[in-house]
Image (cartoon, rainbow, N blue to C red):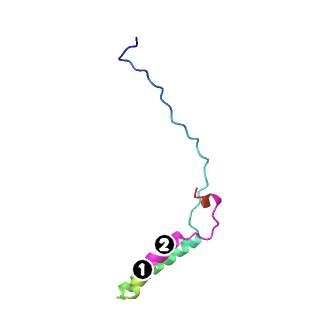
Amino acid sequence: MAEKGKRKAKPQAKPPVKAPRAKEKSVLPFTSKNYILFAIGLFVIVIGYVTLGYGSITLAPILLVLGYCVIIPVAIIINGGKERTPEARRGA
């Protein structure tokens, strides 16, 4: 008869070992077009604050909203004219 206090130990499965990936060449997502638009956005924002300092209550808010809400986001979102790789098109 089997002993009541002892249990058979189940062998534990080891997690699969992932093979190390080959070093991929890092590519910056921004191009010179992105940086130029970003600089234009910063320039518009600075001009907006300068005009705000001189007391403009119409031009300053327009420039600040244009810089913060239009030009800077466009500079981040725009592709810069590069062709997308097939992997990027598939979403990988």
Above or below for 49 versus 12: below
Question: Is the C terminus in the top left, top right, bottom left or bottom right quadrant?
Answer: bottom right
Q: Which residues are magenta?
A: 67-86
Whether residue 50 is visible to the viewer of this picture, yes or no, is no
Q: Which mark is residue 65?
A: 1
Residue 83 in the magenta stretch? The answer is yes
How far is mark 2 from mark 1, CA to CA? 11 Å
Above or below for 49 versus 4: below
> Disc 2 designates what residue?
73
Above or below for 22 versus 50: above
Residue displayed at 36% across by 84% down: 53
Residue displayed at 45% across by 78% down: 67
How crowded is the residue under tag 2: few (<14 C-alpha within 10 Å), some, or many (20+)?
Answer: some
* Quarter of the rendering containing residue 3: top left
Residue displayed at 55% across by 75% down: 36
Q: Pick whichever, 6 or 22, lies toward us.
A: 6
Residue displayed at 56% across by 66% down: 30
**Chief secondary structure of the magenta span?**
helix
Q: Pick whichever, 57 or 6, lies toward us.
A: 6
How crowded is the residue under tag 1: few (<14 C-alpha within 10 Å), some, or many (20+)?
Answer: some
Above or below for 90 versus 55: above
Q: Pick whichever, 26 or 80, lies toward us.
A: 80
Q: Amino acid at mark 2?
A: Pro
Residue 48 in the magenta stretch? The answer is no
Q: Are marks 2 and 1 in contact (CB under 8 Å)?
A: no
